[in-house]
Amino acid sequence: MTEDSRAAGAPTLEDVAKAAGVSRATVSRVINGVRNVDPVIQAAVRDAVAVTGYTPNRAARSLVTRKADSVALVVSGAGDDPPPVAATAGPTASAASAASGSSGSSGESAGFEGGAGSFMTEVFADPFFGRVVTGVVNFLRPRGIHPVLMFAETSRARDEVVSYLRQGSADGALVVSTHAEDPLPALITDAGLPAVLYARPARPVRISYVDLAHQDGARLAAERLLARGCRRIATIAGPFDVPAGQDRLAGFRDTMARHGHPYIPVAEGEFTEESGASAMERLLAEHPDLDGLFAANDLMAVGACQVLRERGMRVPDDVAVIGFDDSRAAASCRPPLTTVRQPVEDMAAEMARLLLDRLSRPDRPVTSVIFEPTLIVRASA
Amino acid sequence: MTEDSRAAGAPTLEDVAKAAGVSRATVSRVINGVRNVDPVIQAAVRDAVAVTGYTPNRAARSLVTRKADSVALVVSGAGDDPPPVAATAGPTASAASAASGSSGSSGESAGFEGGAGSFMTEVFADPFFGRVVTGVVNFLRPRGIHPVLMFAETSRARDEVVSYLRQGSADGALVVSTHAEDPLPALITDAGLPAVLYARPARPVRISYVDLAHQDGARLAAERLLARGCRRIATIAGPFDVPAGQDRLAGFRDTMARHGHPYIPVAEGEFTEESGASAMERLLAEHPDLDGLFAANDLMAVGACQVLRERGMRVPDDVAVIGFDDSRAAASCRPPLTTVRQPVEDMAAEMARLLLDRLSRPDRPVTSVIFEPTLIVRASA
DNA sequence: ATCCTGTTGGAGAGCGCTCTCCCGCCGACC
DNA sequence: GGTCGGCGGGAGAGCGCTCTCCAACAGGAT
């Protein structure tokens, strides 16, 4: 408790004003640095603030400014709605679905009420999300804005997100969908609430997003494999129902075709290590003489490398392997993975920038930003 | 925009009251379910709410209730203060310090202003934090409380956390320190703000925390190794300046001593895979005939296993290995790691419970909770 | 009938802040 | 010397909500 403040409660503007011998309005002006205030009075006010230990009350300020100075950082999934057509609900770029059945792995712990533990566990299993948080926080923090973490994996949870935003608890939302066909973006825009997505939504929504030029990334990978001299090249694609999966495959095929390889063996994976391993096995069953592989993400590449090693095939000597994302897994893989870097932190920061932009000028048209990938060359290709 | 609401703005209680033909107070009572309200009027109010599309304004509510219905989830580090004595600043239980120099790994990305990217990247590198979030969110969500993510790795950032709490933007803090000697807990309690820590602080602070009975966990590991018939047992300890490191070592030593092994080779690690590997090498240099190993966390155990494999020593046939934490790394290790399970999700949920408890009854004495670990037996021991 | 108790709805006072007015003062210009 | 513009400060009206008080009324006991 600071001393001479009134009964119990924290000091208010009124208290500071009294201590400084000025009006509330003047204190407010000094604190918010608005309009000219006599330097002498300014000093007096600052002293009074220090003496009283005053901190502005955020709720009161929010009430009148109609801004919360916080944004919702939403991790959104497909959820419990009746699935429309394809029930495959594959995870999107880089969000592992952790179908791993490894016994004893944490999973949902006992005594949980929500039972939604598994979704969150999945989300954090992939280092991708941590990179997003890093990028977002780095951008928001210097601007005095804080992210509120929310999960929207059920329709109930989605409603809560929308309601949270409508209450004015957050000024807007940064949404990372882990699944295609995520209904949340539409819900948010329908409610007229500002939001920015990570990655282009599967079905078009009038909403801004940040994405990667997946096709270009796949092109880089293809060119690298070809330049290395690989001639019997296959690819492990991401889920076909996810834009990132489609685009990476399309970009890879196009480039290969343009270089005289119209037919490329493809196995579909789900962006997880396990699915990468099994895809590799399927590929090898039909094409045991492969000498080059492009996996649509690092996790699958790691799974593929493991299978190759078990088969006694050396990477990169027998088979050159290229991943995608430049996740931590890529660097720690044996051998370290050549991969297409997705600048996740920068992209996340851009999401935040777009959102704040939108907040300050709501009239502005909805804009999106596409980032260019780069090839990170390591040992595997 | 909902229809018949007034000019532009969202509908308010007043609007609903008008639509329902009652007073503001009555609408408020219906919405908050307080006191008896005639069922007929209740229905009318609910209809009016539906018609107007009313959502209560959180700021206005917070202003009068003096509650934010949110808590700060703070990841705190040692930061930029002059280090007191030991400059080692080891990471605490389960938070990898990611000193990994693997080229090209994300790290801080270009163009960042804060430059604090690396701290966050480190934090998320360990699945531990994701488990904490899972536990916390699972507990808070059904109660309508949301976590605001904050990082407190510099003294500036710490001040911002305190200020955030003092503003009433969050009702309290859940603090996860990644380093010993973290000044944040003291700052928070000095300001009279409610908080709960994950893990007992290195220097005693009057603050509640949730922790694991590390010594008991170490005892389980020791007993398991002994029961297996191991007789030449060593341990890779955590940093000596971290309570978790000390306790796990003490518990292990005690149990071994009680079973006639007063001297146990010890190598200090830093809770990272790399430090575990190098500790293993040091251990083997002096004791090439080891047949049992207890590593103070899974990451170090994984590093140790790698070294053992490189030396041609089989796990568990030549050397039995036990880790600690039951992190994802334990399950995905080859061979899967026998480990001491730390129920992180439950512990995190308990943190949240303790905090809410404290918020509802601030007079209550500060209480802490210690969880009991369990041994998870897999292939490595 | 009268009184008292219990129940239910309304009036209105704030919560702490911002921001629009408005007013007083001073210097400048005619 | 008068008028006027500009600058700096105060007064006060809310922002949307909760909650205390009070009034109105019903029903039972006296």
Image (cartoon, coloured by chain):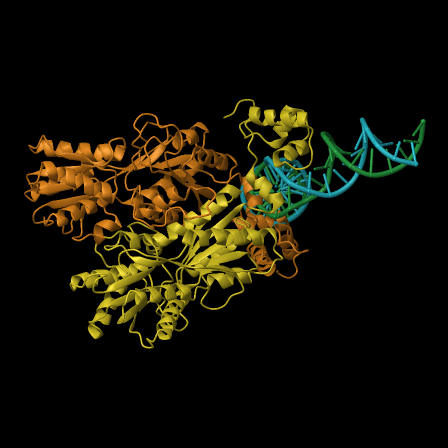
Chain colours: A yellow, B orange, C cyan, D green
Give the percent coordinates (x, y) of residue B165. 48, 36
Above or below A57: residue A75? below
Q: Give the residue drawn at x 45%, y 29%.
A: B192
Q: Is residue A129 above or below residue A213?
A: above
Tell me if residue C16 comes above or below residue B319 in the rendering.
above
Q: Residue at x 20, y 52 (%)?
A: B333
Q: Position of residue A307 (x, y in %)?
A: 20, 63
Residue sitting at x 52%, y 25%? A2
Image position, residue A25 (x, y; %): 68, 34
Q: Where in the figure is residue B208, as x and y percent of width and height? A: 35, 33
Write the residue at 16% across / 44% down: B322
Q: Is residue A326 above or below residue A36?
A: below
Q: Nearer the viewer, residue A154 or C4?
A: A154
Q: In the picture, which quadrant includes the N terminus of chain B?
A: bottom right
Task: Determine if residue B34 is in view.
Answer: no
The answer to whether B115 appears left or right of B267 in the picture is: right
B367 relative position to B374: left or right: right
Whether residue A375 is visible, yes or no, is yes
In this rendered view, identify the residue nearer to me: B120 or A292: A292
